[in-house]
Image: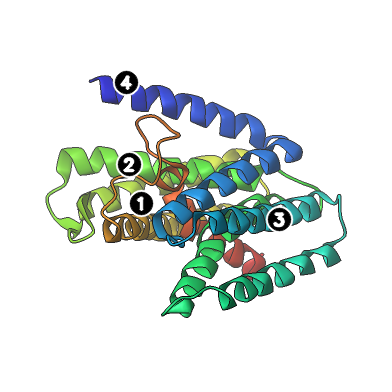
């Protein structure tokens, strides 16, 4: 009971913070910049270099540089040509690893570069949803995305608890069920239709398609993050959100769904 109360209070304040910040471009970039850095730090603790902790500070600084450069470019505060600094940042990773005495150096390189792709880029693309329809920021797509993500999570939880019998992917996540998956799909589709009545940036058909993408790849993102933690015998990615774990635990669905939603909108709008 206490755990349920803790989860509920955390979820409430978390939702209020996200929704409040999404209305203002400066705040959404700041909030999700913070989330991306905390998430990347969690990733480093799970899957980063273990031999020299001091290196993680350098890799975290590169994550800060990468996330901040995209945020400033999206806000129009710096010219997009400065995004090329990220190419030099990636080159610096190779340079650093070149001087480490490792038997399998490319294993470390692969883990590090995967971290930037898996954690930093999805948050950048999520905030980028606000600029797809127009060069001026609009809160509708980022906020609609979160509403659909939460609708899927809520539907999957309720249907899974009440009706779940057939395991979706028992080897990775024993509690997830097909009933929960389709429950999330139903609730997210209904939410997409309701959202389309108030948010007119895109048509109803696009909102419905976005709900399908978010349900499928949000669920996959949850499973992938569970796979990452299981591979390291960890329960949570962190402890910053009481009752929920870490940032990666809370945004596991976003990490795979946001890039796919962004790509869909870029291709078909």
**Which-is-in-front pick, marks 3 and 2?**
3
Within 10 Å of the Cα at label 4, are there few (<14), some (14-19), or many (20+) other Cα atoms?
few
Within 10 Å of the Cα at label 3, are there few (<14), some (14-19), or many (20+) other Cα atoms?
some
The reply to whether discs 2 and 1 touch (Cβ–Cβ < 8 Å) is yes
Mark toward the start of the polypeptide (2 vs 1) = 2
Q: Where is residue 253 in the image (x, y as percent from the top left)?
A: 43, 52
Q: Can residue 202 be seen in this view?
A: no
Q: Is residue 156 found left or right of 143 in the rendered image?
A: left
**Which-is-in-front pick, marks 4 and 1?**
4
C-alpha separation, residue under disc 3 versus residue under disc 2: 37 Å
Mark toward the start of the polypeptide (3 vs 2) = 3
C-alpha separation, residue under disc 2 versus residue under disc 1: 7 Å
Residue for badge 1: 185
Q: What element carries label 2?
A: helix
The reply to whether discs 3 and 2 touch (Cβ–Cβ < 8 Å) is no
Mark toward the start of the polypeptide (4 vs 2) = 4
Label drawn at residue 155: 2
Q: Position of residue 98 (x, y in %)?
A: 58, 78
Q: Where is residue 177 in the image (x, y as percent from the top left)?
A: 20, 52
Q: Where is residue 243 in the image (x, y as percent from the top left)?
A: 34, 31
C-alpha separation, residue under disc 4 versus residue under disc 1: 26 Å
Mark toward the start of the polypeptide (3 vs 4) = 4
The reply to whether discs 3 and 1 touch (Cβ–Cβ < 8 Å) is no
Residue for badge 4: 5
**Location of the N terminus (image quadrant):** top left
Look at 69% across and 40% down and name the residue there: 30
Within 10 Å of the Cα at label 2, are there few (<14), some (14-19), or many (20+) other Cα atoms?
many
The reply to whether discs 4 and 1 touch (Cβ–Cβ < 8 Å) is no
């Amino acid at each position: 009971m206490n755990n349920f109360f803790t989860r509920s209070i955390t979820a409430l304040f978390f939702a209020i913070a996200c929704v409040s910040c999404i209305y203002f471009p400066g705040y959404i970039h700041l909030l999700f910049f913070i989330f991306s850095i905390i998430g990347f730090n969690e990733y480093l603790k799970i899957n980063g270099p273990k031999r020299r902790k001091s290196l993680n500070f350098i890799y975290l600084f590169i994550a800060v540089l990468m996330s901040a450069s995209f945020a400033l470019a999206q806000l129009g505060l710096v010219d997009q040509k400065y995004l090329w600094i990220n190419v030099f940042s990636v080159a610096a990773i190779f340079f650093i690893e070149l001087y480490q005495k490792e038997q399998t150096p490319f294993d470390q390189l692969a883990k590090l570069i995967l971290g930037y792709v898996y954690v930093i880029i999805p948050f950048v693309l999520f905030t980028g949803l606000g600029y797809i329809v127009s060069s001026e920021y609009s809160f509708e797509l980022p906020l609609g995305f979160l509403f659909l993500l939460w609708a899927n999570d809520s539907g999957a939880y309720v249907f899974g608890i009440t009706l779940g019998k057939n395991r979706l992917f028992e080897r990775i996540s024993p509690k997830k069920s097909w009933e929960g998956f389709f429950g999330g799909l139903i609730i997210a589709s209904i939410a997409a239709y309701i959202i389309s009545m108030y948010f007119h940036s895109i048509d109803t058909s696009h909102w419905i398609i976005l709900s399908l993408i978010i349900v499928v790849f949000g669920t996959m993102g949850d499973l992938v993050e569970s796979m990452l933690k299981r591979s390291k015998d960890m329960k949570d990615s962190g402890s910053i959100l009481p009752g929920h774990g870490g940032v990666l635990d809370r945004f596991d669905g976003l990490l795979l769904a946001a890039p796919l939603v962004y790509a869909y909108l870029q291709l078909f709008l």
